[in-house]
Image (spheres, rainbow, N blue to C red):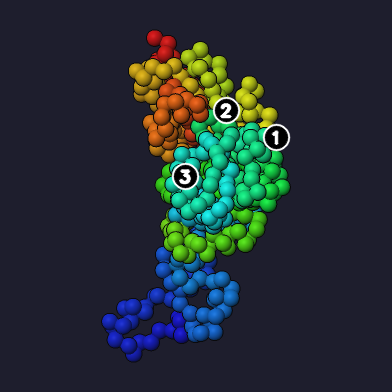
């Protein structure tokens, strides 16, 4: 039996057995341990059957205690009924889309999604006979016009990158449901701490946990959550075949990061509001994209959906002068260029040379992604320090 130790066996045998079965629950650790074990022993066939019946732990690719802990945490923060955790945000998004489409189906998708999410439609499901119409999902008439009898899904993001557009999630869910279609929303930029798409009628919420959820730029993971456990199960069944589960270590790190999510994203959102105000008042900035600004076209819907937290992401348009943009970047002390977002430090990216570099100049400009556009992901720095640092850097670059 598990837990029994027999001294009569040889050293070569018992070196494998000693200490192997000490029982963690008895130690009752304050922090969740990392369960790296690829499999969990059972005592006999009855125990094995019980493990299956209870969806217990047998083999890591099916279930792992750290992944289950992360699933439970995501289900709570997104206010759903079940979740699945994946080895990246892209894996979770693929799972949500692929497990709910088949040849002959039609999808209506936002046209300014995270670049690689767009490519799931054009480069993966498109190959298998799923047709996608890309529209501005903030334009509800355009969404309604794009719906067809075989539309099975509307796909969008709570806050669309990088011009920070905010669609009306409730209205989108009504359009989807009137057509018996699902609404799938990527909530990476807001997280369940600031906004819960499921409460507004979305059927599945997907997230890159690599970003604000983990918040420390040191793990890669994703999740999908739904109020309908059948939708999560469909994706779970596919996950067993794709093998793209979140690893125990990434699940553990991400769960640990999420413990401070509420504190972080609220501060990050406040910092974004303060920066947006400073940029809007600056003579050197041509445009600011953040829904906290009353002049922003999404201010009203953002206030209705998000309340006082307008989100930690903002973009600005600076004059198209590469030398001055370089000088601005070099002058900032508190903001670093990073090919990610959502960490505790403020970071920036340049969409024309990162997320949207595959598009032609004309395509980019049509989406508002000009050569002067910089995107910021706000950190948890002291607000006055952050604002003063950016203001000084602007002055140094553009004031001379
Ligand atoms: C909005 C959004 N969704 C999904 C992803 C993909 O996440 P991951 O890199 O964890 O696969 C990203 C990545 O930046 C993102 O910004």
Residue at 54% x, 76% y is 51
Horizontal side of residue 337 vs 159, given as left or right: left
N-terminal-most mark, 2 or 1: 2
Disc 2 crowd, CA 10 A, few/some/many (<14, 14-19, 20+): many
Q: Is residue 349 above or below residue 323?
A: below
Q: Is residue 355 above or below residue 245?
A: above
Q: Nearer the viewer, residue 100 or 10?
A: 100
Under circle 2, the secondary element is loop
Residue 331 appears in the picture as rendered: no
Residue at 37% x, 79% y is 17
- The single residue placed furthest to the bottom in the displayed view is 8
- Label drawn at residue 304: 1
Q: CA distance from mark 1 to mark 3?
A: 33 Å
Q: Position of residue 125 (x, y in %)?
A: 49, 51
Residue at 67% x, 39% y is 144
Q: Is residue 205 above or below residue 294?
A: below
Q: Position of residue 71 (x, y in %)?
A: 55, 58
Q: Position of residue 207 (x, y in %)?
A: 53, 47
Q: Nearer the viewer, mark 3 or mark 2?
A: 3
Residue 75: quadrant of the picture = bottom right
Task: Confirm or deny contact between disc 1 and disc 3 (CB under 8 A).
Answer: no
Residue 304: quadrant of the picture = top right
Give the residue pinned by disc 3.
122
N-terminal-most mark, 1 or 3: 3
N-terminal-most mark, 3 or 2: 3
Q: Quadrant of the C terminus?
A: top left
Residue 189: quadrant of the picture = top right
Horizontal side of residue 308 vs 3, given as left or right: right
Q: CA distance from mark 2 to mark 1?
A: 15 Å
């Amino acid at each position: 039996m598990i837990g029994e130790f027999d001294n009569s066996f040889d050293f070569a045998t018992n070196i494998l057995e000693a200490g192997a079965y000490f029982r963690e629950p008895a130690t009752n650790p304050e922090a969740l341990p990392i369960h790296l074990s690829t499999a969990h022993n059972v005592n006999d066939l009855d125990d094995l059957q019980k493990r299956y019946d209870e969806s217990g732990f047998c083999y890591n690719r099916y279930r792992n205690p750290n992944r289950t802990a992360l699933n439970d945490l995501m289900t709570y923060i997104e206010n759903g009924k079940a979740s699945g955790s994946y080895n990246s945000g892209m894996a979770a998004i693929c799972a949500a889309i692929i497990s709910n489409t088949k040849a002959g189906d039609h999808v209506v998708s936002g046209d300014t999604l995270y670049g690689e999410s767009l490519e799931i439609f054009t480069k993966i499901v498109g190959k298998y006979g799923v047709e996608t119409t890309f529209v501005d999902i903030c334009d509800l008439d355009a969404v309604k016009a794009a719906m067809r009898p075989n539309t099975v899904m509307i796909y969008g993001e709570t806050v669309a990158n990088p011009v920070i557009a905010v669609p009306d999630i409730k209205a989108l869910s009504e359009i989807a449901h009137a057509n018996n279609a699902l609404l799938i929303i990527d909530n990476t930029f807001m997280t369940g701490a600031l906004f819960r798409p499921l409460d507004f009628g979305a059927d599945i919420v997907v997230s890159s946990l690599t970003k604000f959820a983990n918040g420390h730029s040191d793990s890669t993971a994703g999740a999908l959550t739904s109020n309908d456990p059948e939708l999560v199960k469909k994706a779970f069944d596919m996950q067993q075949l794709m093998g793209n589960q979140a690893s125990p270590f990434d699940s553990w790190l991400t769960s640990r990061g999420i413990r401070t999510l509420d504190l972080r994203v609220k501060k990050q959102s406040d910092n974004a509001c303060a920066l947006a105000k400073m940029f809007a008042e600056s003579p050197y900035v041509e445009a600011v994209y953040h829904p906290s600004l009353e002049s922003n076209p999404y201010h009203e819907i953002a206030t209705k959906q998000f309340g006082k937290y307008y989100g930690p992401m903002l973009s600005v348009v600076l004059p198209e002068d590469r030398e001055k943009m370089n000088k601005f970047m070099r002058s900032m002390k508190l903001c670093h260029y990073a090919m990610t977002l959502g960490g505790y430090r403020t970071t920036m990216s340049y969409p024309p040379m990162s997320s949207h570099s595959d598009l032609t100049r004309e395509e980019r400009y049509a989406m508002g992604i000009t050569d002067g556009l910089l995107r910021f992901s706000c950190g948890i720095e002291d607000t006055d320090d952050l604002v003063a640092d950016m203001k000084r850097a602007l002055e140094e670059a553009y004031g001379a």
